[in-house]
Structure formats: structure tokens, C-alpha cells
Image: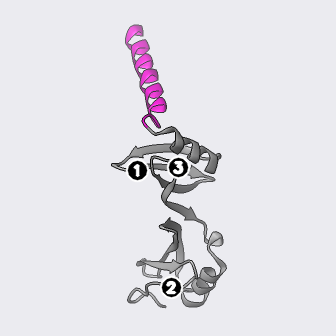
């Protein structure tokens, strides 16, 4: 019985060590260097290799991030979870004016091809969720049917 217990602990330790060391194995050095420089406070880091890119998911201060890198370490695209107070003031004002009867659910900031977009998910009093998309000038890009109070 003691040997079974020790074997289970040993196998668990080996599995854990393998998972930790292989978390970024195969990721080119320019990518890992760019990532660690840009996000030194990142935790819960998980890498995923795609055909022509490397995606990393992680957290900073309990907020989720995703960044997609090319093999040379340049950023292809990024996604960042935002608190409501971190949204641009123009978007916050629109939410207060046009969606005051809605509950804030979540927000994300997307950057790709030099363009920044924001997604804000709000929920009406009936529990129906609406995704609102804004550009970097705070302009609402969509007006879902039935989303206004």
C-alpha cells in the first residue's frame, strides 16, 4: 500500500513537472522574450502553437488576456479583458446615456492590424445579453435590435 501511494505521488510529480516545462516548449525565443518583456506580471500562462503563430493566454490582476505572436516576436493580434472603469470615457458615457437600464457584464479590447475595437456585453432586465462594438473613436459600430431600453 505504501508503494502504491509513493508511486502515485511520484507519477503526479513527474506529470506536473512535464506540464510546467512543456508549457512554452517549442515557442521561439523571440516570442517568449517579447512576451516576458511586455507582460512581466503575467500569471496562469498557457501557450498554443498554430500553423503560423503562437498564442498565449494569461492573467494579470485577475483579468484575462490573449496575445497572438508571429515567430519573430511581433504581435499579430491581442485581446484584453477590461473592467468597466477601464473603458474609454466616450464609451462609458454612451453606456450611461443609452444603456443605463442595462447591467454591465464584461468588456474586451481587441487590437489587430493596427485597429482597436471594444466589445461591451450588457444585459437587460429580462436577462437578454447584447454585445456592443465600438471603434477607437468611441463610435458604436452596431445597434442590436431591442437593445435600447
Within-10-Å neighbours for mark 1: few <14, some 14–19, many 20+: some
Upstream in the sequence, badge 2 or badge 3? 3
Helix, strand or loop under label 3: strand
Upstream in the sequence, badge 1 or badge 3? 1
Mark 1 or mark 3, whichever is nearer to me: 1
- Decide if residue 97 is on the left or right side of residue 23: right
Whether residue 39 appears in this view of the structure is: no
Query: Residue 69 appears at what percent x and percent y?
Result: 47, 52
Helix, strand or loop under label 1: loop
Disc number for residue 58: 3
Which secondary structure type mostly characterizes the magenta part of the structure? helix
Disc number for residue 140: 2
Disc number for residue 53: 1
128 or 119: which is nearer to us? 119
Examine the rendered structure and indicate whether residue 21 appears above or below residue 97: above
Query: Residue 13 appears at what percent x and percent y?
Result: 46, 22
Whether residue 30 appears in this view of the structure is: yes
Is residue 91 covered in magenta? Answer: no
Helix, strand or loop under label 2: loop
Residue drawn 48% across the image and 48% down it: 56
149 or 28: which is nearer to us? 28
C-alpha span from label 1 to label 3: 16 Å
Residue drawn 63% across the image and 83% down it: 90
Query: Residue 78 appears at what percent x and percent y?
Result: 50, 60
Upstream in the sequence, badge 1 or badge 2? 1
Within-10-Å neighbours for mark 3: few <14, some 14–19, many 20+: some
Residue range (magenta) = 1-26
Examine the rendered structure and indicate whether residue 106 appears above or below residue 137: above
C-alpha span from label 2 to label 3: 28 Å
Examine the rendered structure and indicate whether residue 6 appears above or below residue 96: above
Residue drawn 41% across the image and 26% down it: 15
Amino acid at each position: 500500500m505504501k508503494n502504491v501511494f509513493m508511486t502515485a505521488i511520484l507519477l503526479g510529480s513527474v506529470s506536473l513537472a512535464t506540464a510546467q516545462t512543456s508549457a512554452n516548449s517549442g515557442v521561439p525565443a523571440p516570442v517568449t522574450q517579447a512576451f516576458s518583456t511586455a507582460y512581466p506580471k503575467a500569471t496562469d500562462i498557457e501557450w498554443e502553437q498554430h500553423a503560423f503563430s503562437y498564442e498565449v493566454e494569461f492573467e494579470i490582476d485577475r483579468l484575462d488576456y490573449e496575445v497572438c505572436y508571429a515567430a519573430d516576436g511581433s504581435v499579430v493580434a491581442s485581446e484584453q479583458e477590461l473592467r468597466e472603469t477601464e473603458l474609454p470615457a466616450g464609451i462609458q458615457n454612451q453606456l450611461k446615456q443609452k444603456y443605463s437600464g442595462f447591467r454591465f457584464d464584461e468588456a474586451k479590447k481587441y487590437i489587430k492590424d493596427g485597429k482597436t475595437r471594444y466589445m461591451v456585453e450588457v444585459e437587460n432586465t429580462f436577462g437578454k445579453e447584447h454585445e456592443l462594438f465600438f471603434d477607437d473613436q468611441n463610435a458604436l459600430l452596431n445597434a442590436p435590435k431591442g437593445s435600447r431600453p
